[in-house]
Image (cartoon, grey):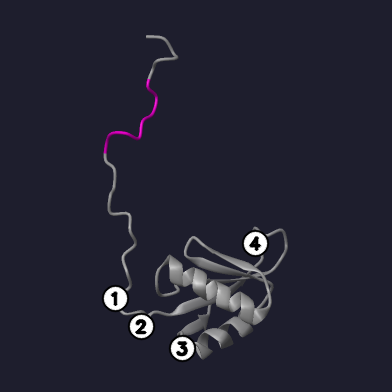
Amino acid sequence: MSKETRLVFSTESGRIRSDSTPVPIANPADSVCRVRREIKGRGGKEATVIWDVPGGPDELVTLAKRLKQRLGTGGSAKDGQIVIQGNRVDAVLEALKAWNFKAIKAGG
């Protein structure tokens, strides 16, 4: 068998998970958003990270857009987290509580 025809890896067979949809939170009112400031891995720049936000990916993107507009800053929503540019922990906590989210400051 030549090297050009040898099968090394294939995703066409084997165990393929079809239940890759995230499990919704049982009661979103009981969940708590966590907010912290991060520097590590960002080239020395500060960022505010929000995670454990109730809802799915669409709600995460919508909340990120509302926060960015309210704070007048940039950011993104990916991997189940919202990242806001700059040290805006207090302003984010205030905004989340105004929108009836349970939010706490995480870390130091």
Residue type at the position of mark 2: Asp
Q: Tag on residue 69?
A: none
The residue drawn where x is 35% and y is 35% is: 11
Q: Secondary structure at mark 2?
A: helix
Residue type at the position of mark 4: Lys
Residue wearing tag 1:
26
Cα gap from disc 4 to disc 3, whole angstroms:
30 Å
The residue drawn where x is 55% and y is 72% is: 64
Depth check, front residue: 104 or 6: 6
Cα gap from disc 1 to disc 2, whole angstroms:
9 Å
Res 93 visible: yes
Q: Earlier in the sequence, mark 2 or mark 3?
A: 2
Q: Quadrant of residue 22?
A: bottom left
In which quadrant will I find the C terminus?
A: bottom right
Q: Is residue 23 left or right of residue 49?
A: left
Q: Earlier in the sequence, mark 4 or mark 3?
A: 4
Residue type at the position of mark 1: Ala
Q: Is residue 18 above or below residue 50?
A: above
Dot 2, crowdedness within 10 Å: few (<14), some or many (≥20)? few
Cα gap from disc 3 to disc 1, whole angstroms:
18 Å
Q: Earlier in the sequence, mark 3 or mark 1?
A: 1
Q: Main secondary structure of the magenta part?
A: loop
Residue wearing tag 2:
30
Dot 3, crowdedness within 10 Å: few (<14), some or many (≥20)? few
Q: Which residues are magenta?
A: 7-14
